[in-house]
Amino acid sequence: MQWDSLQLSEGALDAFSYVLRNNPATKADICRCMGKGISTVNRYMTELCEKGLVLESGVADSSGGRKPVLYSINSQSYLICCVNISTIYCEVAVADMALHVLKIDSISIGAKDTPDEIIARIGQAYRNQLAFLGADENRFLGMGVSVFGAIKNEQGVLYKPIIQYMNEQWDGYPILQRLQEEIPLTLYAEKGINAAAMLEYHHGKARDSSNIIYVLCAMNIRSAVIQNGHITGNSPFFEDAFGHMVINYDGPLCQCGQYGCLNCYAAIPAVLEGFSKEVKRGHSTMIGGDVDHVTIQQVCAAARANDIPAVNAITDKAHMLGIALANYINIICPDKVILAGLMVKESELYYDTAVKTARARLGFTGNQDVTFQRLGSFSNSLTVGAGAMLLEKLIHGRPPVQHS
């Protein structure tokens, strides 16, 4: 299904955008957002209903008189293919227009796996999902793709990220061309962290915010900044630039070649290394086996049971993240900061310590009112975010109307 073939009017596009982000919504809501009269909005909603994009889904509460009709995204009409390609895995999902995931599959990426092999597996996963769902490919509006690093959109090739993909053939790989050869859909690609941040901004826990910082804490530290609906303030080439903020010029050597980067102090490998050092200093731990081969899940579980080496390792590394966050917040001045990723998911202690440390360093800047949020609304944010970015591109192709 080609989006352009729907031939929606400009006003109908804006009305659809509002319903998408405020699902469900009344005509009165849309009138207030768009500054249009009810007769004009009636025309837009009729157009959207006739094209199968929205439908009447119930009635809202009313303080008196006739209850207003609620309009929702028609989840039974069109579909989106969502793909996230990370350094060690990729995910392929089918979602409806309301960004509900209908089927998702994960594919591991090893050092010997070539890009062509991974793209072929993505294509096969997509075709298997179509068969599983009994879905016609004509129902698909397109494919959203998020990647670790960045894409030269003109050439459709990957930039070399600071932390390399496991197979060096990904550097300069014509990913957009190969994906469209494998899955012949309209395609839009974006950095993964940007996709996840925009997903939360428009559809998740940052919908009530104007300016946000979104930080993903996992094997590395990544971030995105959204100000008044626009992605700003991060490197155009790398999505893990925040993780390479130097916080100790005399610190350990980082993979990027610098010394003392935030990744060396606050990412999962740093936590695991800190735990190992704590045990080797003589602290006893409830975790058995080789302390150099434990998982982050084991360390976080031990910390919840007040295991001293685990608690010390997590609080120490989260403290360093908090210091870096305070610097970031003092520069950007967001109204909300979302911390997400595996490290935050597994350890409330990590999150609480980072937030407490950051807050202690905001007093002199006037940023005390910033709110912090642990985790976002979506469990597969990098993948679903790719679909959200595709919808933004299809609907607007221009700066989006800001949600209220």
Image (spheres, rainbow, N blue to C red):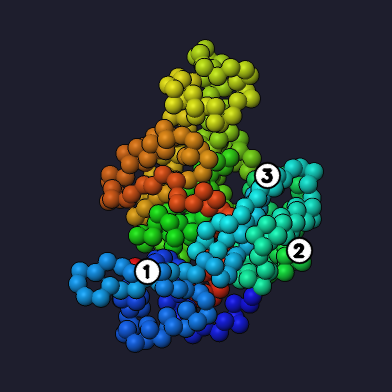
Q: Tell me which corner region of the image, top left, top right, bottom left or bottom right, holds residue 402.
A: bottom left
What residue is at 50 percent from the left and 14 percent from the top? 283
Where does residue 81 sit, x and y in percent of width and height?
Answer: 63, 62
Q: CA distance from mark 1 to mark 2?
A: 40 Å
Which quarter of the figure is the C terminus placed in? bottom left
Of labels 1 and 3, the one closer to you: 1
Farthest left residue in view: 64
What residue is at 43 percent from the left and 56 percent from the top? 204
Q: Which tag, 1 or 3, sits closer to the chain's start?
A: 1
Residue marked by disc 3: 88
Q: CA distance from mark 2 to mark 3?
A: 21 Å
Vertical position of residue 60 compared to residue 106: above or below:
below
Q: Is residue 188 left or right of residue 14?
A: right
What residue is at 69 percent from the left and 47 percent from the top? 107
Residue marked by disc 2: 182
Give the label on residue 58, or none.
Answer: 1
Assign a secondary structure to mark 2: helix
Neighbor class of circle 1 (other Cα within 10 Å; few <14, some 14-19, many 20+) is: few
